[in-house]
Amino acid sequence: QPSSEPLLYVNRIRRVLPDALAHLTLLEYLRCHSIFTSPKLILGHSVLFGTKDIGLTGTKLGCGEGGCGACTVMVSSYDAKSRKCSHYAVNACLAPLYSVEGMHVITVEGLGSCKRGLHSIQESMARAHGTQCGFCTPGFVMSMYALLWSSQTPPSEEQIKECLAGNLCQCTGYRPIVDAFRVFAKTSDILYTGISSLSPEEAKSICPSTGKPCSCNSNNVNDKCVVGDNRYKATSYDEVDGTKYTEKELIFPPELLLR
Ligand code: FES
Ligand code: FES
């Protein structure tokens, strides 16, 4: 029998949504716990509703108005008609808490950690020096995570750049971040779209590994680009275990399928 309680799952953990919190955003709910541990704030109730240990501060509050992407989380929902799960990158600072009722929210804490081992996206970010002060990093990681989960096949480099368009970084200049995520791109797609409008002569200067004009003179798609390698050592998809995202590490909570 499906539960009639207002529910959401956060990083695979079941949470009952308290009443009277319509003024909260998803970000406030995820980050704060003191307001939930104070019973007097839950009007007329002295129960804590199991929310006292949320405190997931990996999701950052930057601009608070949808402009910087520091608060990005992935929200998964199930459509009973099509029987499909959809995964979206969501700005938690804009999403009202109750708008994710019945959904599964994944924050950066739900991926990897130093204790459990990094997720391949985090590992790649670290290897490519794509993080400096680190404030924007969870947002970038979650945007990439959502893209990988919503893509049936590995995305193209253009799709990766597009998915990061809502994430701002004040430190890195973006190049290392894009480099970090290029290992998840489907190189053949980049090559195909990259050379389509070029003459045969121009196409010869396109690196088959990166799909961009390059001086490496390689003509084999399986060769690593030597020029590109100088910038960033780990360019191999396998080296950062980029296959991880296709594993069924994310299981949509069965309880939410019945609602
Ligand atoms: Fe949400 Fe900036 S804090 S987009
Ligand atoms: Fe500092 Fe991106 S690493 S804002």
Image (spheres, rainbow, N blue to C red):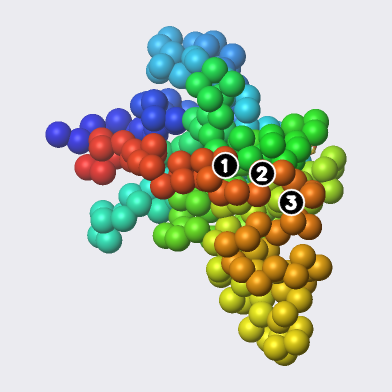
Q: Which residue is mark 1?
A: 239
* Three-letter amino acid code at the position of disc 2: Ala
The CA distance from mark 2 to mark 1 is 7 Å
* Residue 47 vertical position relative to residue 131 in the rendered view, above or below: above
Task: In this rendered view, identify the residue nearer to me: 95 or 250.
Answer: 250
Q: Amino acid at mark 3?
A: Asp
**Numbered tag placed on residue 203 in the rendering:** none
Position in image of residue 159 (x %, y %): 60, 63
Residue 50 screen position, x and y as percent: 41, 16
Task: Say whether mark 1 is within 8 Å of ligand 2.
Answer: no
Q: Secondary structure at mark 3?
A: helix
Question: For the residue carrying disc 1, how many other residues have a C-alpha within 10 Å: few (<14), some (14-19), or many (20+)?
Answer: some
Work out whether residue 26 can be spotted: no
Give the residue pinned by disc 2.
Answer: 234
Identified at 56% across, 29% down, the residue is 118
Could you tell me which residue is drawn at 59 percent across and 76 percent down? 192
Question: Mark 2 or 1 closer to N-term?
Answer: 2
Q: Residue furthest left?
A: 1
Q: Is mark 3 within 8 Å of ligand 2?
A: no
Q: Is residue 40 left or right of residue 205?
A: left
Q: Which residue is mark 3?
A: 229
